[in-house]
Image: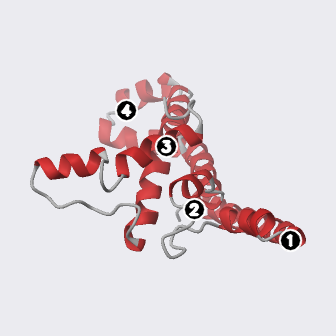
């Protein structure tokens, strides 16, 4: 469900969960006698709170991708391994994980790009605060362009940001695809 719902809608839902005064999470904590937690007010908790929300929002698509990867592993390989005496543990580490390598590369790349391009969540939840603790790269570029009017600077930042993302994803791909010796 979170994959198909608008990012703003999901963010507003989580804003209601995280609200200090009337949030569902703090209400649950209050039931157990635990003091309220300033999820989006404390600079140390704001970004981890946004990361949890972003992870929840995107985990559905990653699960679907893993399911597709699992369905693409031929059943005959498992049957052959069973006939050769391989147990489930061996099949998982010798067949399933290696055959899911390309799926894992894709998921790592998508999550890296998603992490770098985080915009809606910090913009709606905190506006980059408290104390700039949730200022993502994309939000910074947006503020430079549309809040301060530095369009050229923002365009240059966007280009450099895209190059950084490309380099990080290529580096990750090399590391994840590297075959152990």
Q: Nearer the viewer, residue 24 or 60?
A: 24
In the displayed orientation, state which residue is furthest to the front.
21
Q: Which residue is mark 3?
A: 12
Q: Is residue 95 left or right of residue 168?
A: left
Query: N-terminal of the two: label 3 or label 1?
Result: 3
Q: Is residue 95 visible?
A: no
> Compared with residue 138, is residue 85 higher up or lower down, i.e. above or below?
above
Q: Secondary structure at mark 1?
A: helix
Task: Kindly report the distance in space between the C-alpha atoms of the residues bearing marks 1 and 4.
Answer: 58 Å
Query: N-terminal of the two: label 2 or label 3?
Result: 3
User: Which numbered disc covers residue 84?
Assistant: 4
Q: Which residue is mark 2?
A: 127
Q: In the image, which is nearer the foreground, mark 2 or mark 4?
A: 2
Query: N-terminal of the two: label 3 or label 4?
Result: 3
Residue 146 horizontal/vertical position (percent): 78, 62
Q: Secondary structure at mark 4?
A: loop
Q: In the image, which is nearer the foreground, mark 1 or mark 4?
A: 1
Task: Kindly report the distance in space between the C-alpha atoms of the residues bearing marks 3 and 1.
Answer: 31 Å
Q: Which residue is mark 1?
A: 156
Q: Is residue 41 visible?
A: yes
Residue 94 horizontal/vertical position (percent): 43, 44
Assess disc 3: are there few (<14), some (14-19) or many (≥20) residues with their C-alpha within 10 Å of its C-alpha: some
Q: Are marks 2 and 3 in contact (CB under 8 Å)?
A: no
């Amino acid at each position: 469900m979170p994959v198909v719902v608008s990012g703003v809608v999901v963010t507003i839902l989580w804003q209601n969960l995280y609200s200090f005064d009337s949030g569902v999470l703090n209400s649950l904590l209050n039931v157990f006698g635990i003091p309220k937690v300033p999820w989006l007010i404390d600079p140390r908790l704001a970004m981890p709170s946004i990361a949890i929300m972003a992870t929840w929002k995107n985990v559905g698509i990653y699960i679907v991708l893993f399911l597709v990867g699992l369905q693409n592993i031929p059943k005959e390989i498992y049957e052959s391994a069973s006939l050769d005496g391989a147990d489930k543990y061996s099949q998982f580490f010798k067949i399933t994980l290696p055959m899911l390598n390309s799926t894992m590369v894709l998921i790592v790349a998508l999550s890296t790009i998603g992490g770098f391009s985080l915009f809606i969540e910090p913009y709606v939840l905190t506006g980059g605060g408290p104390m700039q603790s949730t200022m993502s790269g994309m939000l910074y570029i947006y503020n430079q362009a549309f809040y301060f009017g530095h369009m050229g600077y923002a365009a240059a930042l966007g280009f450099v940001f895209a190059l950084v993302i490309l380099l990080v994803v290529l580096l990750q791909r090399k590391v994840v695809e590297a075959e152990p010796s």
